[in-house]
């Protein structure tokens, strides 16, 4: 049985304001970006990419199909449902994504700069391999989860390559895709037109700030186990401890204001 001390704080006593919840979201967000950079510099690009792949695959398996239900997208064509899912689910976390419709079998998404996950100047130090691993972990598995072997994702632009945002489209081909073709890269293709408007929830500021906190926190919830599985507990502890201290020192003043 745990013994409480004067240092123990009940969550119910924390200031229930948008600023307080946003401060927590900020720390989780920065910790995530710091972990990506920390892995790249301390264990290398290839192991870091494996962690990113596992993180996004695990998130996909946990959240994608339930999310389609919650967002009311289950009756949409598969390509359209997938594109709308990324717009609506990411917007809840404060991530700017646009949907550009083309047809029932081809539907575009555009993750606008600044990229949330590669925050600030960190984008200059994120190898493209990590961005590709993210796409293979999540976007490339949507067709599998939907039982549609013809559905894949084509990336036409990546911020990590100096291109204007992460842009691409879900497409349902007329044939089953090999596993290596579920994510393809075709730089230079352009969306057919402007983005379409999608509704966003009208929530009060406190609830929205809590959702953004949960969005950022869930990445930490999934990336630390992925690091442990790929890198081992010792390396994970070493990298995460250093990164956590650095982020805590670097952003202490900002979150305390």
Image (spheres, rainbow, N blue to C red):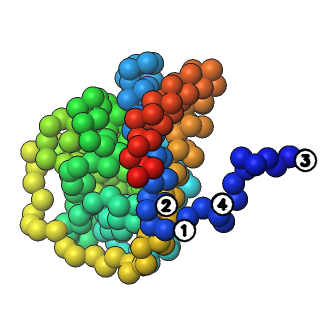
- Pick the front one: 233 or 106: 233
Q: Earlier in the sequence, mark 1 or mark 4?
A: 4
Disc number placed over residue 224 in the picture, else none = none
Q: CA distance from mark 1 to mark 2?
A: 7 Å
Q: CA distance from mark 1 to mark 3?
A: 29 Å
Disc number placed over residue 16 in the picture, else none = 1
Residue that carries the numbered disc 4 in the rendered image: 11
Q: CA distance from mark 3 to mark 4?
A: 19 Å
Q: Earlier in the sequence, mark 1 or mark 3?
A: 3
Rendering coords of residue 21 (x, y %):
49, 61
Residue at 31% of width from left, 79% of height from top?
199
Verify CB contact (< 8 Å) between mark 1 and mark 2. yes
Rendering coords of residue 238 (x, y %):
56, 22
SS at badge 1: loop
Residue at 28% of width from left, 76% of height from top?
198
Q: Could you classify mark 1 by the number of other residues whose Cα lies within 10 Å: few (under 14), some (14-19), or many (20 or more)?
A: some
């Amino acid at each position: 049985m745990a013994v409480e001390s004067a240092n123990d704080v009940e969550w119910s006593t924390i200031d229930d304001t948008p600023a307080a919840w946003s401060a927590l979201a900020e720390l989780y967000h920065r910790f995530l970006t710091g972990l990506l950079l920390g892995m790249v510099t301390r264990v290398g690009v290839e192991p870091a990419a494996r962690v990113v792949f596992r993180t996004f695959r695990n998130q996909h398996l946990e959240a994608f199909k339930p999310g389609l239900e919650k967002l009311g997208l289950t009756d949409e064509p598969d390509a359209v449902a997938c594109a709308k899912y990324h717009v609506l689910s990411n917007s809840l976390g404060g991530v700017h994504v646009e949907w550009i419709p083309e047809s029932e079998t081809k539907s575009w998404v555009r993750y606008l700069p600044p990229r949330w996950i590669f925050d600030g100047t960190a984008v200059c130090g994120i190898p493209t391999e990590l961005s590709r691993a993210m796409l293979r972990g999540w976007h490339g598995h949507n067709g599998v989860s939907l039982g549609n072997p013809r559905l894949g994702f084509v990336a036409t632009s990546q911020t990590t390559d100096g291109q204007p945002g992460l842009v691409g489209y879900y497409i349902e081909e007329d044939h089953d895709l090999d596993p290596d073709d579920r994510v393809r890269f075709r730089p230079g293709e352009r969306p057919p037109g402007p983005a379409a408007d999608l509704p966003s929830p009208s929530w009060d500021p406190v609830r929205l700030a809590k959702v953004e906190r949960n969005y950022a926190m869930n990445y930490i919830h999934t990336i630390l186990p992925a690091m442990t599985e790929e890198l081992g507990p010792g390396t994970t502890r070493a990298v995460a401890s250093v990164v956590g201290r650095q982020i805590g020192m670097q952003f202490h003043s900002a979150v305390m204001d």
